[in-house]
């Protein structure tokens, strides 16, 4: 790292991510063995894209224990509805635990995933916390036997050319999102050591859930900005990632998402709201002001991130401490940011934001 990089960390991060993502896209376009392409029909196909489960061994350092209920309910729903399940990495937490222990601890959720796989509706991407699965022999020995036939493969990237009949409208590139991030990519060997031998014992004692890097605003901003900047330069391509644990829809911030949710709520309520509807509005207004204050502080400290066009989407994660999960749905021409459970705590998807995929690709 030179003096220029030290003085301009934003530009350094953008350059590193851009180089890494250029290489990933090139491998995906030439159908390299580490990447997979699937045609997505705008009028008929259904996908659910989730990431960052961080499944552990059901001890106090397992960030997925509280989310298993919502995740299992979501998988049952999407299997029956005919969706293809895409997992964008960090499914198992292998920086803290050994693969055999994790896989044995969550045999039921793996069985739910295996049903998708056995019907050809399961696509798996590896991330930095489950990067063991980038090696074919590790997948064949440990992971594939639990999913049945056909033999399971785990990829670095998924490229989805989107078509409407014979017309191709654009492409979706799905990756975990750690590519080019110094801490999660280049320095992953050191980060793994610290998490396994320092953070894991602390977490088991304190039972603190820290969904890194979701609460690290500097890292979040830097990666969001770098990924958005790279995607902005790609013709006819929309980027979907996990990794940062924070949902992003059409490159909009959490503030914009909550504001849109509030507008939808107010439209449904009308002029004569019930007491329950008034309370729901009040809670949403409180969340909006809470997030606005956070984002003002974030911009003050780290120069802000202004996203304007729908080049970049983020799934969020499946390990929030409240037991909720978020993901990206693609359903017959519509793209949605969803949360399980819904706002009443029922095992149903709650749509946080939605748009026409055709409009997104055209924009």
Image (spheres, grey):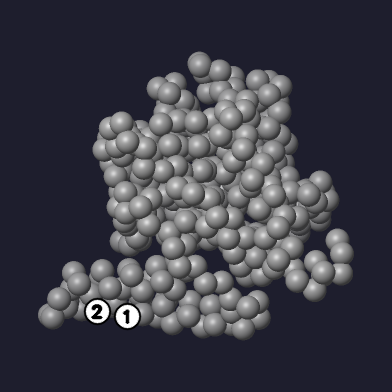
- Mark 1: few/some/many CA within 10 Å (<14, 14-19, 20+): few
Contact, mark 2 vs mark 1 (Cβ under 8 Å)? yes
Question: Where residue 278 is drawn, which disc sits there?
Answer: 2
Q: Residue at x 34, y 60 (%)?
A: 353
In the picture, measured across the screen, residue 266 lies left or right of residue 62, that is left
Say which of 260 and 68 sits in front: 260
User: What is the secondary structure assignment of the residue under circle 1?
Assistant: helix
Q: Residue at x 56, y 72 (%)?
A: 305
Q: Is residue 90 visible?
A: no
Q: Position of residue 362 (x, y in %)?
A: 35, 52
Say which of 348 and 44 sits in front: 44
Say which of 30 and 285 sits in front: 30
> For mark 1, what is the residue?
282
Q: Position of residue 65 (x, y in %)?
A: 55, 48
Say which of 271 and 160 sits in front: 160
Q: Residue at x 59, y 64 (%)?
A: 225
Q: Position of residue 348 (x, y in %)?
A: 31, 50
Residue 299, above or below 206: below
Query: Distance of mark 2 from mark 1, alpha carbons?
Result: 6 Å
- Mark 2: few/some/many CA within 10 Å (<14, 14-19, 20+): some
Which quadrant: the N terminus?
bottom right
Q: Residue at x 36, y 37 (%)?
A: 168
Question: Where residue 215 is drawn, which disc sits there?
Answer: none
Residue 209, above or below 115: below
Residue 23, above or below 165: below
In the picture, measured across the screen, residue 225 lies left or right of residue 267, that is right
Q: Is residue 313 visible?
A: yes
Q: Position of residue 99 (x, y in %)?
A: 69, 34
């Amino acid at each position: 790292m030179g003096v220029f990089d030290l003085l301009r960390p934003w530009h350094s991060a953008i350059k590193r991510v851009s180089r890494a993502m250029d290489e990933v896209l090139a491998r995906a376009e030439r159908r390299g063995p580490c990447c997979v392409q699937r045609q997505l029909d705008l009028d008929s196909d259904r996908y659910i894209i989730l990431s960052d489960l961080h499944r552990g061994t059901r001890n106090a350092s397992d960030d997925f224990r509280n989310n298993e209920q919502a995740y299992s309910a979501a998988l049952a729903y999407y299997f029956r509805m005919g969706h293809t399940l895409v997992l964008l990495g960090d499914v198992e937490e292998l920086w803290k635990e050994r693969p055999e222990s994790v896989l044995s601890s969550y045999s039921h959720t793996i069985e739910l995933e295996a049903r998708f796989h056995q019907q050809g509706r399961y696509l798996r991407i590896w991330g930095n916390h489950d990067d063991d699965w980038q090696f074919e022999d590790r997948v064949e020995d440990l992971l594939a036997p639990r999913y049945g036939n056909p033999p399971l493969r785990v990829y670095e990237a998924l490229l989805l050319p989107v078509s409407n009949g014979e017309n191709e409208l654009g492409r979706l590139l799905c990756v975990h999102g750690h590519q080019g991030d110094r801490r999660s990519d280049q320095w992953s060997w050191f980060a793994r050591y610290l998490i396994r031998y320092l953070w894991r014992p602390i977490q088991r004692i304190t039972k603190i859930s820290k969904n890194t890097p979701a609460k690290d605003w500097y890292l979040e901003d830097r990666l969001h900005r770098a990924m958005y900047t790279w995607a902005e330069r790609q013709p006819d391509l929309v980027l979907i990632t996990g990794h940062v644990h924070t949902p992003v829809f059409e490159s909009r911030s959490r503030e914009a998402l909550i504001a849109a949710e509030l507008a939808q709520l107010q439209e449904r309520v009308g002029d004569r709201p019930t007491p329950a509807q008034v309370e729901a509005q009040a809670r949403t207004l409180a969340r909006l002001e809470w997030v606005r204050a956070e984002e003002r502080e974030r911009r003050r400290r780290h120069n802000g991130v202004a996203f304007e066009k729908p080049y970049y989407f983020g799934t969020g994660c499946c390990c929030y401490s409240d037991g909720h999960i978020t993901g990206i749905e693609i359903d017959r021409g519509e793209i949605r940011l969803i949360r399980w459970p819904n706002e009443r705590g029922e095992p149903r998807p709650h749509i946080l934001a939605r748009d026409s995929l055709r409009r997104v690709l055209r924009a």
